[in-house]
Image: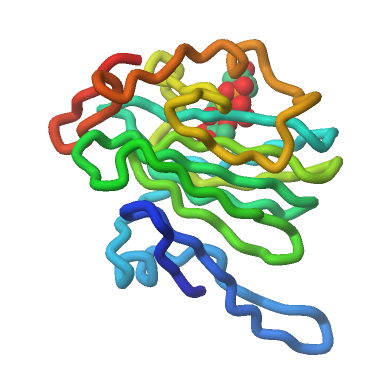
Amino acid sequence: MLVKSTTLNKAAVIELEPIEDNRGYFARSFCKGTMVEYGIDFDVVQTNVAFNHYARTLRGMHFQAPPFSEDKIVSCFQGAIYDVIIDLNRDSSTFGKWYGLTLSEENRLALYVPKGFAHGYLTLTDNTSIHYMVSEYYTPSYESGVRWNDPAFEIEWPFTENLILSPKDERWEDFNIYTDGMIQSKGENYGQ
Ligand SMILES: Cc1cn([C@H]2C[C@H](O)[C@@H](COP(=O)(O)OP(=O)(O)O[C@H]3O[C@@H](C)C(=O)[C@@H](O)[C@H]3O)O2)c(=O)[nH]c1=O
């Protein structure tokens, strides 16, 4: 597996290195040692799958606040999604910036989402299956989010009309770039 940097601090794209033969291929999709070589210390405590019936389904933008901030590794093993992250760490030079890429069963890419990043995705096809590993247990009282179309971030989504969202994801309040965000080293969460 190859780990490649992105435009956002700490976030990375993971590329499989399939070993092919007449049956198909084999590839490592996660290796703690390889991640450490790239400076990422990731301990998986839970793996999750999500399925979406329809294209234009948007889930996000979610994070767990300190002290339950979590790293994630997200991949799409059926169909295709446009996956987006936002750096909400106030002490990061890429604070407030977003990054997006297509994850699909064809490109077999995964996205490493560091602590303090909001994460969400828009399905590009019907019948999408998403797999993600997380480094913290689900802690609903620390679950938080920002709205997919919050003007503070200007995310360029492939579609913006006729989206399917949960009521929770429609209602995240506006992010205030001056007062909201997190500082992981201090375990602090500001604003929402
Ligand atoms: C995330 C999660 C949800 N649930 C429950 C809560 C609820 O009843 C149901 C659906 O939850 P949600 O609507 O939050 O599911 P969903 O919108 O798919 O939430 C996920 O979105 C993507 C973008 C992420 O990045 C994930 O970390 C996670 O927040 O599943 C768990 O039991 N454990 C979990 O770890």
Q: Give the colour scheme shown.
A: rainbow
From the top left corner, tell me how far across and down residue 32 is, in percent: 39, 63
Q: Is residue 145 above or below residue 90?
A: above
**Which residue in the rendered view is the most extreme toward the bottom?**
21
> Which part of the image, by quadrant, shows the C terminus?
top left
From the top left corner, tell me how far across and down residue 134 is, in percent: 46, 42
Q: At x 55% / y 49%, what residue is drawn?
A: 100
Q: At x 75% / y 51%, what residue is drawn?
A: 80
Whether residue 132 is visible here, answered yes or no, is yes
Q: Nearer the viewer, residue 172 or 138?
A: 172
Q: Would you say 6 lies left or right of 81 here?
A: left
Whether residue 135 is visible here, answered yes or no, is no
**Which residue in the rendered view is the most extreme toward the left?**
186
Q: At x 24% / y 47%, what residue is drawn?
A: 93
Q: Would you say 114 lies left or right of 75 here?
A: left
Q: At x 49% / y 28%, what residue is drawn?
A: 62
Q: Would you say 106 lies left or right of 189 here?
A: right
Q: What is the count of numbered marks?
A: 0
Q: Is residue 36 above or below residue 163?
A: below
Q: Nearer the viewer, residue 42 or 109?
A: 109
From the top left corner, tell me how far across and down residue 7 is, in percent: 40, 57
Q: State which image quarter holds ligand 1.
A: top right
